[in-house]
Amino acid sequence: MTKKFNFDVTATDGRARTGVISTPRGEIRTPAFMPVGTAATVKAMLPESVRATGADILLGNTYHLMLRPTAERIARLGGLHRFMNWDRPILTDSGGFQVMSLAGLRKLTEEGVTFKSHIDGSRHALTPERSMEIQALLGSDIVMAFDECTPFPSDEATARRSMELSMRWARRSREAFGDRPGHALFGIQQGSVYRDQRQESADKLREIGFDGYAIGGLAVGEGQATMFEVLEYAPAMLPEDRPRYLMGVGKPDDIVGAVERGIDMMDCVLPSRSGRTGQAFTRFGVVNIRNARHQDDPRPLDEHCTCPACRNYSRAYLHHVNRAQEIIASMLLTWHNLHYFQELMQGLRDAIAEGRLAAFVSDFHARRAEGDI
Ligand SMILES: O=c1nc[nH]c2cc3[nH]c(NCCN4CCCCC4)nc3cc12
């Protein structure tokens, strides 16, 4: 890798900013939304379709890929980009979050976590060192430090113990990552909903030194109001000349609120997962295509939308193929949702660049109905 990893802020509007992350595999326009490609695929999408929605970067998961097909096999086959036919940037999560939410029989020690695979019950271990090794084998461009996502709710003492463990693991991740030009290592802030702990975590990460900084421990059931309370102060604790990545977020209004509060990168399974269940996100709110009221409706999901689902198909058709559990239903609704999320990001980037974010946000909220439309 000759070219290096870089981040430039290009405009600001209040606490929000636009920027460009340069990597050897291409540029990432921020604020950016990352579609989730858990098992080396964004479910129901071809990589070229994901790119057509406007995505500059995908997310992959260490936990899933280490279990199947294993990181060693992907490395032997040329790495994750070649394996999944996506030649642009990939960010990989470090595995701790998925172990706690998916694996069985978990044992957490200072060393790391041991667990049973949710696929075949085999025993595995993840440590900061092993997580760095796996992410290097995958060849991801942005590597996440190995951390523990502090459960919510946690009392202050529990949250502190968890945060301090994650900071010791952050240092071990940094040391194990080594010097890899063109590749980035992001640290992850913890501290739950406790401002002093969030500050200590940010200070520790800054002391260790990372290429980017994630806000972890959120979107874990605390609710939007509490998440926004933390986002009132947490982003500014992190270096302003580095990308700030809010993990696991979120619904469109979560995304808008996070960008307003200084977040540059986000990822969520919501647009793809809900596409498979028949939930379509539009500028007017959520359409549940399974609802009988759509069965004779000749209109598209959203007449302003230029995605293949909205250009070529009626709600009646989408209702039919969803009810019939046809594969095309997942394809079309996933494509639409990812297109809508990327269109929202482009709207946010344009509004920030032109200094009219407040107007964009009030227009965003004014259009949206509360319930299903
Ligand atoms: O603290 C974290 N460290 C490492 N990875 C993470 C991933 C996360 N993902 C989430 N939330 C995901 C919420 N998502 C919403 C849609 C349905 C599935 C769950 N919080 C996270 C915190 C972390």
Image (tube, rainbow, N blue to C red):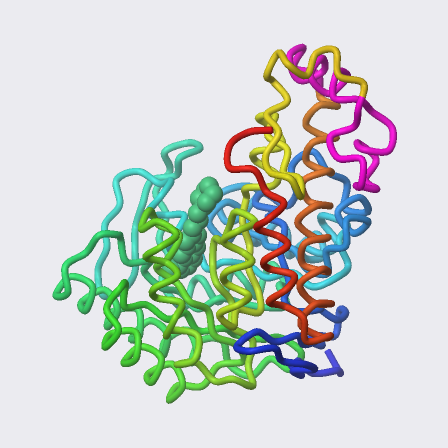
Q: Which residues are magenta?
A: 299-326
Q: Position of residue 59 (x, y in %)?
A: 59, 55
Q: For this view, does 121 lie left or right of residue 74?
A: left
Q: Nearer the viewer, residue 208 or 373?
A: 373
Q: Residue at x 86, y 33 (%)?
A: 311
Q: Nearer the viewer, residue 114 or 8?
A: 8
Residue 5 vertical position relative to residue 320 in the rendered view, above or below: below
Q: Position of residue 367 (x, y in %)?
A: 63, 45
Q: For this view, does 326 lie left or right of residue 290?
A: right
Q: Nearer the viewer, residue 130 or 245?
A: 245
Q: Position of residue 361 (x, y in %)?
A: 59, 59
Q: Residue at x 53, y 51 (%)?
A: 253
The N terminus: image quadrant: bottom right
162 drawn magenta? no
Residue 342 vertical position relative to residue 180 in the rendered view, above or below: above
Q: For this view, does 298 lie left or right of residue 257?
A: right
316 drawn magenta? yes
Q: Residue at x 57, y 33 (%)?
A: 274
Q: Nearer the viewer, residue 145 or 205?
A: 205
Q: Position of residue 246 (x, y in %)?
A: 48, 63
Residue 166 vertical position relative to residue 104 in the rendered view, above or below: below
Whether residue 304 is visible: yes
Q: How many marks?
A: 0
**Which residue sits furthest right?**
312
Q: Quadrant of residue 39?
A: top right
The C terminus: image quadrant: top right
Q: Residue at x 81, y 18 (%)?
A: 298
Residue 176 vertical position relative to residue 225 in the rendered view, above or below: below
